[in-house]
Image: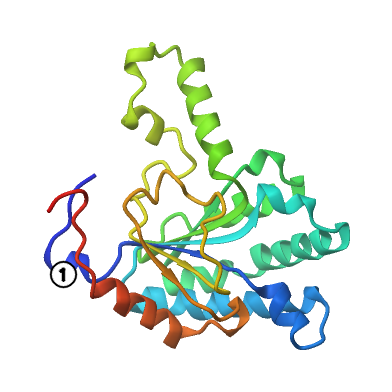
Amino acid sequence: MTEKTGDDLRIPHHVAIIMDGNGRWAAGRGLPRIKGHKAGVAVIEDVIDAAVKIGIKHLSLYAFSTENWRRPDQEVSVIMSLLRFYLRLHTSRFCNRGVRFHFLGDIENMPESIQRDAIALETATANERKMVFHLAVNYGSRIELVKAVQSCIKDGLKVEEIDETMINSRLWTAGVPDVDLLIRTSGELRISNFLLWQCAYAEFYFDDCHWPDFNQERFRLALDSFASRKRRFGGI
């Protein structure tokens, strides 16, 4: 990890967001949870736009965890339908913004149609350079770490050869800088198995609003909070 100084500390290179509260937002309005998920998709577009304008290089959004498969079948089905819709319609939008798409998660255990659409979007946006958008779907940090260690073993590494570099290079985020700022909405104060390794030195910011009410103004407040902090990375 390279310590950052000066202006690098004011604008985070990598922002991760746990998009929480879609269901509670809907329930508070007497709507089915499905409506909350649909409302939350629109917010993603605003946040991507803001991140590109600000100069953030990596944006990771937690959309669906490995544990979320335990939700009611109808809710999971709607979320998967929204994901398919999103992947198929956003090629031009990403290219127009200069955004490269990256599917972050256990893609091999996703429906084949989603695998195809995700790979197609990654391929179509591969040359974009302004920002990388990591969409975490079927993601669980503990599984990611287990798979990384298993990969070290399969590659024939000796125990003494397995270090941070070897594990880091086998994560789903290989080549991506560590998270600088982790944001979570809906007032929950936990990170829910999201980017545990990558958040080792991240600054945390918790917003009480539900994700569908999150907007560019609230995003900037989180970034302002980050800019006001002094990051020591274990130093004095």
Quadrant holding the N terminus: top left
Q: Is residue 145 above or below residue 213?
A: above
Name the one closer to the observer, 107 or 149. Answer: 149
- Residue 197 in percent (x, y) is at 42, 43
* Residue shown at 50% from the left, 84% from the top: 215
Q: Give residue 49's quadrant in the image.
A: bottom left
Display coloring: rainbow
Q: Is residue 175 above or below residue 222?
A: above
Q: Residues within 10 Å of mark 1 (few under 14, many from 20)?
A: few
Give the residue number, with chain letter if any, for mark 1.
7
- Residue 194 in percent (x, y) is at 52, 52
Q: Is residue 156 left or right of residue 80?
A: left
Q: Is residue 17 above or below residue 97?
A: above
- Residue 42 in percent (x, y) is at 62, 80
* Residue shown at 41% from the left, 61% from the top: 128
- Residue 213 in percent (x, y) is at 58, 85
* Residue shown at 72% from the left, 67% from the top: 85
Name the one closer to the observer, 133 or 69. Answer: 69
* Residue shown at 60% from the left, 49% from the top: 119
Q: How many marks?
A: 1
Q: Give residue 56's quadrant in the image.
A: bottom left
Instruction: Name which residue type carries label 1.
Output: Asp
Secondary structure category for the residue under label 1: helix
Furthest toward the right, the residue is: 74
